[in-house]
Amino acid sequence: MTPDHEPKQVTGKIYGGVDTHEDTVHVAVIGAEGGDLDDREFPTTPAGYRRALAFILSYGEPAAVGIEGTSSYGAGLTRFAVGEGFNVVEVVRPERAERRRLGKSDPIDAYQAARAAMGTHRIAPAKDASLEGIRALHNARRSAIKARTAAMRQIYQQLVTAPVAIREKYRKLNSDKRVAVLAQLRVRREQPPIDRAVLLALKSLATRCVDLKGEHDRLGVELDHLVTEANPGLRTVYGVGPDIAAQLLLTAGGNTDRLRTDASFAALCGASPIPASSGKVSRHRLSRGGDRAANCALHRIALVRMAGDQRTKDFVSSQRQAGFSSKEIQRKLKRAIAREIFRHLITPVAVPGIEDLRPLRQAKNITLTAAANQLGVWPTAISELERGIRRNDDLANSYRTWLNAA
């Protein structure tokens, strides 16, 4: 790599800082004492990245390079710099008070990123690029279900103002049944113009819903494969499906160096308790900060467990008897779930295989109901175990032993 200017080697350590944008990155270099050395703008292209790193190296060997947005606008430069052996750290956005005091511009932000890279405040290890496939599928699947929900709402609103005969015929159906019926609707040309136009619109929206549902399901299969491969133990936690596992992996950043303690992970997910005491009242509330998507994932796990997990039901019952409100109980549950998720993220475990269970049962012509009755569980528990939806090692071992002896 060759710089675009005459090299000015500086004795001692130097630090780089990068303010990232869609089309450009602004790079700044400071000395070991924090003094400004130089800054320059480069395009977000492979050639631009090469010149940006050469610009930093022209002042010496950098101890660290702070990049803002290592998984968004700075993803390309981060991958390039890590590949070249640079020590890259992620820099969080400057605090509002600091921005009001110093102002905002690309050079100012780049120098602030470089100064952040000098210390331990406002930095974290750069996110691992190994989760980009999960991120892409997760975003696409989420947008598909959002678009489907929007189309279903349009159908509902269209029926509100539709002609009486059409409204009365379809509005009593539940949402999924209505979509299925409208998608197969045949619109005749001899129908009144208004009726025909409304039915064509409803059919178009319903067909869109069906297509988006199929797209959502197909992406879900691929996403499930990726998250299971990335962390099989996390995927089999009670209440963790493909979407939730993907969100938690993306929040963690793919590399366990970013996660120091379960308390810091809970704070990252907005699940750490915040004191909310006053006078004789001593209580805590949930944090309203952190990654709200991760907080939503923990909330969904809590709801699933409150509905189907006996241990969670017992805990909720005991907490209600102690006088705690629903919000306070959910706060405690989410904090405990964050602790459990943290253990799975930092210490991935291998999940015992269950691929042999279904073929073994089918080879012996044993029904799910017969197997469930023998083991004292519901047929759905056996089905979910065979499909890998829910992990239960004790049940799997008992089931395999019984099948081999049957």
Image (cartoon, rainbow, N blue to C red):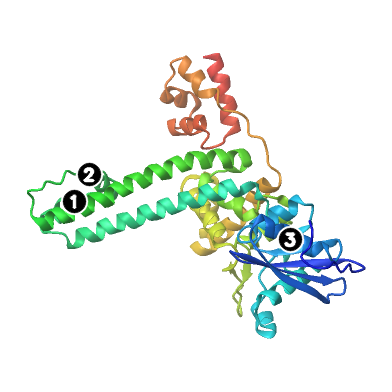
Q: Residue at x 66, y 76 (%)?
A: 95
Q: Which mark is residue 51?
A: 3
Q: Amino acid at mark 2?
A: Val
In front: mark 2 or mark 3? 3
Give the answer, above or below, for where 293 lies relative to 309: below
Count of numbered circles on the image: 3
Q: Residue at x 79, y 52 (%)?
A: 85
User: How far, Cα to Cα, is label 2 from label 3?
Assistant: 59 Å
- Residue where numbered disc 1 is placed: 170
- Please, what is the three-letter code of the amino acid marked with disc 3? Arg
- 271 vs 137, nearest the viewer: 137
Q: Nearer the viewer, residue 40 or 243?
A: 40
- How dense is the environment of label 1, judged by Cα within 10 Å: few (below 14), some, or many (20 and up)? some
Question: Dots 1 and 2: beta carbons under 8 Å?
Answer: yes
Q: Which mark is residue 310?
A: none
Between 364 and 144, the one nearer to me in the picture: 144
Structural distance between the alpha carbons of marks 1 and 3: 62 Å
- The furthest residue to the right: 11
The residue tagged 2 is 181
Residue 267 falls in image quadrant: bottom right
Residue 216 in the image, given as x and y percentages of width and height: 42, 45
- The residue depicted at 79 percent of the width and 64 percent of the height is 56
Q: Earlier in the sequence, mark 1 or mark 3?
A: 3
